Amino acid sequence: MALVPRGRAEPPPRLAVAREWPRAFWTLARLGLGWSDLQKLPRGDGRPVLLLPGLFNSDRSNLAMRALLIRLGYRAFGWELGRNFGARTVGVEAERLFARVAAIHAETGEKVTLIGVSLGGIMARLAAHRHPEMVREVITVSAPFAGPPTATNVWRQFEWLTGEKIGDPAVVARLEEAARPLPVPATAIWSRSDGLVNGLICREEDGPQARAIEVSSSHLFVQMKPEVLRAVACVLAGQSPSGPAR
C-alpha cells in the first residue's frame, strides 16, 4: 500500500486533541471494571509475543496488555530497551530491536509475533520486512505507518524526542518501507476518532494477509482499551472480533 498523499491526510482537529486526556482516563476506568471479563477471552497457544511501546513510552505502558496475554497463555515479552526515542533507542538501522527479536526467537525456537503501539507499530513492520524468518505476524495499534507524519499532531514532538527530522531521507525511507505490504500476516487496529493521529493512516486495505479492525478510542492509553485488548486476543487466537466498539 502506498502512503496516503500529503494533501489528502490532515491531522485530527484541535477539539479531538483536547478530548484525549479525558477519554484516556475513561479508558483506565473501563479497564479496571472490565478486567475480569477480559480474562475469559480465548486461551493462547504459548507462542512468543513481543510488545513494542509508542513514542516516549517504555515497557510500563504495555503492562496491562502483557499481563493479560501472559494470563491467557502466551509468552509475552517487553522489548527491554527503555523509553522509545526512535533511532536513539533502537539504533539507526533498528539493530537493537532486531537483536531483541533474534534473542526471543533463539530462546523460544519459534517465530515471534510483534505487537506495536503507535511508533512501535511502525518499528514492528520494519522488523517484519527485514527479518520475516523470525516474525510470525504483526499487530499494530494506532500506528501511523500509511501516511505522512504531518497527518499527526505529534510530529514536532517526534522530531524533538528522536533528534530526526520528518523530511530526513532516512526517516522517509523507513516510513515508505513500513507502508509496503508485509510478507507476514498483518492486523491494524485503528480509530477514526483518534485525537493525535489521523486514523486513516493507521490501516491498510484488507488483503490476503492484511486486515484492519476499527475501534473507537483515544490515542493515549489505546493499548489499555478493553476493546483493543479483546481484538488483540481474538487475532492471536485466530478468531474474528465482534466488530467496531462504540
Image: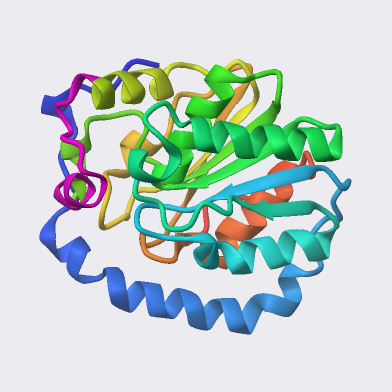
Q: Quadrant of residue 194?
A: bottom left
Q: Name which residue lies at 36% across and 30% down.
A: 92
Count of numbered badges drawn on the protein: 0
**If the image is split into quadrants, where does the N terminus sit?**
top left
Q: Name which residue lies at 37% across and 32% down.
A: 145
Question: Which range is magenta?
Answer: 156-169
Residue 76, image x, y percentages:
73, 53
From the viewer's perspective, is 47 left or right of 77? Answer: right
Residue 72, image x, y percentages:
82, 60
In this view, 157 is above or below 173: below
150 inside magenta stretch: no
In this view, 180 is above or below 124: above
Front residue of 56 and 24: 56
Does residue 50 show up? Answer: yes
Residue 36, image x, y percentages:
74, 78
Front residue of 235 and 149: 149
Does residue 212 show up? Answer: no
**What's the image's color scheme?**
rainbow
In this view, 87 is above or below 93: below
Q: Name which residue lies at 56% across and 30% down.
A: 211
Residue 224, image x, y percentages:
53, 66
Q: Name which residue lies at 54% across and 79% down.
A: 30
163 inside magenta stretch: yes
